[in-house]
Amino acid sequence: MTFQVQTWLWALLLLPVLAVGLVLWARSRRAAESRYADPDVLPLGPPPRTRAFRVVAAVLALLAVGAGIVALARPSVDDQEDRRQSSVIVALDLSNSMLKDDLEPSRLDAAVDAAKRFVDEAPDGTQVGVLTFADNIEVVLPPEDDPEVVKDALDSLGETREGTALGEAVVQSLGALTASGALTPPPENPSVSAGRILILTDGANSIRRAIPPAEAAARASSMNVPIYTIQLGDDRGRPDQPTPAETLSLMATETGGIYAQTANTEDLRAVFADIGTIIAPVEKLRELTVVAAAASLILVVLAALALVLARPGPRRSGGTQPT
């Protein structure tokens, strides 16, 4: 058990002070009764039954105060539940070449349309984040389970730019998945990973200073995060580098994902069917504040009942009644 506001626990030190105060008060009351009354004429103090119920009421009241203090400290226990979940980062290429019209009306429009279809057909509860990449990376939207919010983000992408930092896009996507909690606890293998990456691009890495795609894929593989790559168009890339098809297929194969070369419905369906959702254990804190507060209230009620029962009945005189 843990307490989320531990400073309140210091207030428990008041309980012994209150207990001592109640004992001293009871003794001073008895001393006053013996000082101003003659026990041979009138019995001193309440009967034993009344004294017993008063002691019970005092103990219950102290326990009620203690339970109230514990409630203020917000007691919690570690709990674990299985939750159906999946988080997918859709990484969209915003390089200038995405404006080519070999896919109608353009590669970029085809990519956005494919991303929207993915959002529509993704299983219920799937969280989708949006990331764009060109010469730099921008996380447009962290993983979100509202399809309309994701579509709005897809409709508000920035202008295209030079360059394709593909490896950096993968690394930033891994960071976004980690921040969302999708990789906690770490997946045992790619097939049961609740965090996945979907890349829609027309080319391979063209930023030499950036992290190479192979290195980024190796990092994703070590984290058991599959990468799904969809190549738009058939660009051959730079002569001094592997072709986009070779780079993207290697990234998918190494991480346990799927590679497709167009963005038609059949290719997307293969990606949808494989991504699915994952039954994953989720760690959380289960608060017991309500239990402690309810216990405090019950103890207060019991203390009040004990005080009612402690009320002494009418006393009987020890002398004879006059005739």
Image (tube, rainbow, N blue to C red):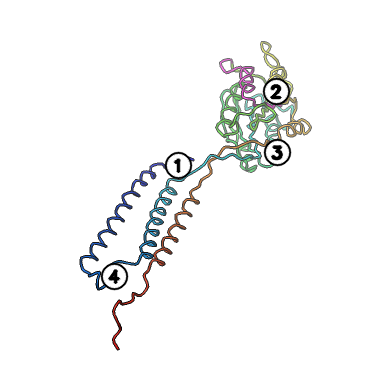
The image shows residue 113 at horizontal and vertical percentages of: 70, 35
Q: Mark 4 points at which residue?
A: 43
User: Where does label 2 land, which residue?
Assistant: 252
What is the number of the mark on residue 4? 1
Task: Look at the numbered disc 2 and give the secondary structure of its residue.
Answer: helix
Given contact means CB atoms under 8 Å apart, are the residues at marks 2 and 4 in contact? no
Q: Name the residue under label 3.
A: 122
State which tag comes first along the sequence, 3 or 4. 4
Dot 1: few (<14), some (14–19), or many (≥20) neighbours within 10 Å?
some
Amino acid at circle 1: Gln
Q: How far apart are marks 3 and 4 (CA)?
A: 83 Å
Residue 243 left/right relative to 73: right
Say the numbered circle drawn on residue 255: none
Residue that sits furthest to the right in the current view: 266
User: Mark 1 or 4 closer to N-term?
Assistant: 1
Image depth: mark 3 or mark 4 in front: 4
Q: Which of 246 and 58 is in front in this view?
A: 58
Which residue: 41% across, 53% down?
A: 63
Q: In this view, does 138 lie above or below 122?
A: above
Residue 305 coordinates in the image, percent (x, y): 43, 64
Q: Are marks 3 and 4 in contact (CB under 8 Å)?
A: no
Q: Which portion, as a residue range, is magenta?
A: 208-232
User: How far apart are labels 2 and 4 at the CA level?
Assistant: 93 Å
Packing grade of label 3 (10 A; few <14, some 14-19, many >=20) is many
The residues bearing labels 2 and 1 have C-alpha atoms spaced at a distance of 43 Å
Would residue 310 be seen by someone viewing this image from the given angle? yes
Query: Label 4's element?
Result: loop
